[in-house]
């Protein structure tokens, strides 16, 4: 095929009148008859960019991408196609070698891709170019070290690639420009313009620019494929000096590619302005529509969920544990908790606890507690990075709840609403919707961390109800963090938790507490560290385990303990409680204050399970308690350690206990000190005689 056949009429459409452009658009629209088939545009764009990047390593095109991730992205797209990308690409290549001129071939490709959306048409065509370009480079780069590649290069008469570097650089720049424009087309395609009314002239102008951009992109792809597959027909300018107008020169090929890039870049600049205007209008109108919808209860939650996630795709969700694509109807008539976070979500140990608190909880399976969690990851940047995509795939495939199947395609209006109205700022939040779609809690995350499924239906009123019955005790502090310690709490054992950043103090305290345990005090001792000194705490945990000083939480569970305290504080503050009036908030804030950088304080807490009889000592108060050994030692087996500490903190009694208790005479009992069960003070012993 003569290359001049392509170059001779390259600017016929460019110089055409507005009426000729209208005729062109009408021809394209006649062939546009989408039937709903889609592909993951962002992921396929990443594949194409990676091919171009690796083929032209001198150009910094995109981040390197894992081959498994590329395979997953293509397979995800192919599931939605009637024909594979390979077959479509092959048919496009056939169109490039026909007898028609380039304009007629361009229209033929539009006819071939008539069943696809606009961004899908362009991506499939660009895939054909990336395939040709990538295969060429694989052979060219391998022929000097691979006999098979050398043999293929010989049969295909591949020329020396070094002399064609200007062409390859120009092609790389052209593809990069086309990718940017295709992203704008995909962005416009993703706007819910059929759901909200925009200004007619804005939408009309944008669509016209999109049609023209689509024409020139596909036309450029056909020209580029022809150049790459006919490089052997192009002569080196230095060997055969020719003018840039000669169709067989490198200069003419570069000039053609650069001209096409300039044309597409110009259209793309206008399209970018128009798409941004459409997006701004859409976000504003969708914002108001969402506000209005959320103010009135509906018969179910389908309308609001469709507006947020289902305007572009009938199957926008992924049931992670089953790897199934599902629609929002799966959430109908349920309480839905929207878990909004960065793609990284949470550390593994926190994810495990979150799953345990929600789906592994005994209350989750009760029929009257029907709820689902939907994970909505939102990237911190406009475009998802390769690392974020990989992390999302790993996490979403492992967790028991639903997730957005293609979160990189989330509506900008939804992201804007989450940030503006729900105040999402990278820290995970959990927005609770009742079965009618009404928001009952703008952030139920702290409820879930504290009470798990017991917090159902996760409403703000339920949060108040739970706090009304909660007490300051060890169950509140330790519940669900570690199964063994939870069992101790449930069995009402006396438990001591302590924290310090000084190993020597930990060793000294451990020795002292073991002496007390030897006095028949039933006591379990747990080190819970500090929250912001991970290296120091990690070393202390290692020493405790090695020297068997006491029980200890693991480093990851230590972070869960302090995260639980943070959740308690946020929950209390959200209910407008103050430390002056709320005992739990006051105690939690005092504990959290011990973790400040300028605070090196040691502390211990003693208590029994769900009992509110709990006592906290600072390091110096613990020392004072030990100094009064003779005061409480003889009472310890009878009253226990918690009451012994309270007894040591009270001033010496000036008179005996005023309570009374009559028991049968016992000579041995008369020789012992009896402690009042009510006030924990020594009781005066008297003998009463029953006169018959």
Image (cartoon, grey):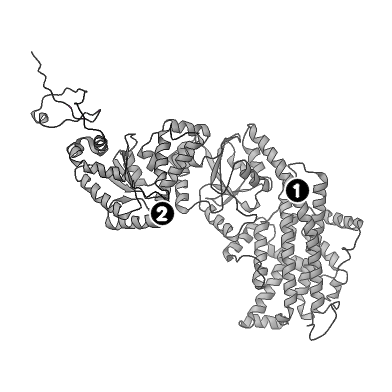
Find numbered disc 1 in the image and state the secondary structure of the residue it sits on: helix
Q: Give the mark nearest the N terminus, 2 or 1.
A: 1
The x, y position of residue 438, in whole percent, is 60, 34
- Along the line of sight, the residue nearer the viewer: 577 or 555: 577
Residue extent of the magenta highlight: 676-688
Question: Viewed as shown, does residue 641 lie left or right of 256?
Answer: left
Quadrant the C terminus occupies: top left
Relative to 536, is 322 on the left or the right? right
Q: Position of residue 224 (x, y in %)?
A: 77, 70
For image coordinates 30% across by 52% down, the residue present is 506
Q: Quadrant of the N terminus?
A: bottom right
Q: Is residue 681 magenta?
A: yes
Residue 364 location in percent, x, y?
A: 47, 40
Residue located at (79% from left, 56% from top): 270
Decide if residue 137 is on the left or right side of residue 540: right
Between residue 435 and residue 348, name the one nearer to us. 348
Residue 278: mark: 1
Instruction: Give the camera-side residue of 548 and 108.
Output: 548
Q: Most prominent secondary structure in the magenta stretch?
A: loop
Please, what secondary structure does the residue beneath circle 2 have? loop
User: CA gap, disc 2 to disc 1?
Assistant: 49 Å
Residue 122 figure quarter: bottom right
């Amino acid at each position: 095929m003569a290359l001049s056949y392509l170059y001779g009429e390259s600017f016929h459409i460019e110089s055409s009148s507005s009426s000729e452009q209208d005729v062109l658009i009408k021809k394209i629209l006649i062939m546009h008859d989408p039937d709903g088939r889609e592909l993951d545009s962002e992921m396929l764009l990443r594949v194409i960019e990676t091919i171009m990047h690796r083929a032209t390593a001198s150009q910094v095109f995109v981040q390197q991408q894992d081959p498994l991730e590329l395979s997953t992205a293509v397979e995800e797209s192919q599931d939605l196609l009637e024909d594979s990308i390979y077959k479509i690409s092959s048919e496009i290549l056939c169109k490039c070698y026909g007898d028609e001129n380039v304009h007629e071939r361009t229209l033929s490709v539009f006819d071939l891709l008539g069943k696809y959306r606009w961004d899908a048409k362009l991506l499939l065509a660009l895939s054909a170019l990336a395939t040709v370009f990538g295969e060429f480079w694989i052979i060219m780069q391998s022929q000097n070290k691979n006999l098979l590649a050398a043999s293929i290069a010989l049969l295909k008469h591949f020329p020396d690639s070094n002399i064609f570097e200007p062409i390859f650089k120009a092609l790389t720049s052209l593809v990069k420009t086309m990718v940017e424009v295709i992203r704008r087309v995909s962005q416009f395609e993703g706007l819910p313009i059929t759901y909200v009314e925009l200004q007619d002239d804005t939408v009309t102008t944008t669509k016209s620019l999109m049609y023209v951009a689509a024409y020139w992109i596909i036309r450029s792809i056909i020209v580029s494929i022809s150049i790459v597959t006919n490089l052997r027909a192009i002569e080196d300018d230095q060997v055969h000096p020719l003018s840039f107008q000669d169709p067989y020169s490198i200069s003419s090929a570069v000039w053609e590619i650069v001209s096409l890039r300039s044309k597409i870049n110009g259209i793309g600049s206008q399209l970018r302005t128009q798409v941004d205007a459409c997006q701004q209008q859409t976000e504003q109108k969708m914002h108001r529509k969402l506000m209005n919808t959320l103010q009135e209860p509906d018969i179910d939650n389908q309308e609001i969920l469709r507006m947020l996630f289902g305007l572009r795709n009938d199957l926008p969700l992924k049931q992670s544990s089953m790897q199934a694509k599902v629609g929002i109807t799966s959430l109908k008539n349920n309480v839905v908790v929207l878990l909004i976070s960065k793609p990284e979500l949470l550390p593994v140990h926190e994810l495990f606890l979150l799953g345990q608190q929600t789906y592994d909880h005994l209350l989750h399976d009760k029929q009257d507690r029907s709820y689902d969690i939907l994970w909505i990851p939102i990237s911190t940047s406009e475009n998802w990075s390769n690392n974020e995509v990989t992390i999302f795939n790993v996490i979403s495939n492992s967790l028991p709840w639903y997730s957005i199947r293609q979160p990189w395609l989330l509506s900008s209006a939804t992201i804007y609403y989450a940030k503006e109205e729900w105040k999402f700022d990278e820290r995970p939040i959990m927005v609770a919707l009742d079965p009618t779609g009404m928001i009952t809690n703008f952030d139920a995350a702290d409820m879930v961390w504290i009470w798990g499924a017991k917090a159902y239906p996760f409403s703000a009123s339920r949060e108040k109800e739970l706090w009304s019955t909660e007490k300051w005790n060890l169950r509140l502090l330790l519940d669900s963090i570690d199964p063994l310690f939870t069992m101790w709490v449930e069995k009402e054992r006396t438990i001591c938790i302590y924290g310090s950043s000084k190993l020597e103090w930990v060793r000294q305290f451990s020795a002292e507490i073991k002496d007390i345990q030897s006095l028949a005090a039933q006591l379990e001792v747990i080190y819970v560290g500090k929250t912001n000194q991970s290296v120091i705490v990690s070393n202390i945990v290692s020493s405790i385990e090695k020297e068997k000083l006491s029980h200890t939480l693991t480093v990851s569970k230590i972070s869960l303990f302090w995260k639980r305290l943070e959740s308690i504080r946020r929950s209390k503050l959200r209910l407008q409680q103050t430390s002056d009036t709320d005992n739990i908030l006051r105690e939690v804030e005092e504990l959290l204050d011990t973790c400040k950088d300028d605070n090196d304080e040691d502390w211990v807490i003693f208590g029994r399970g769900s009992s509110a009889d709990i006592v906290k000592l600072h390091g110096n108060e613990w020392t004072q308690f030990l100094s009064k050994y003779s005061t409480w030692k003889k009472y310890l087996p009878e009253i226990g350690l918690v009451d012994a500490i309270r007894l040591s903190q009270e001033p010496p009694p000036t008179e005996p206990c005023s309570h009374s208790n009559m028991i049968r005479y016992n000579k041995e009992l008369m020789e012992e000190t009896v402690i009042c069960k009510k006030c924990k003070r020594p009781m005066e012993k008297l003998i009463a005689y029953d006169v018959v």
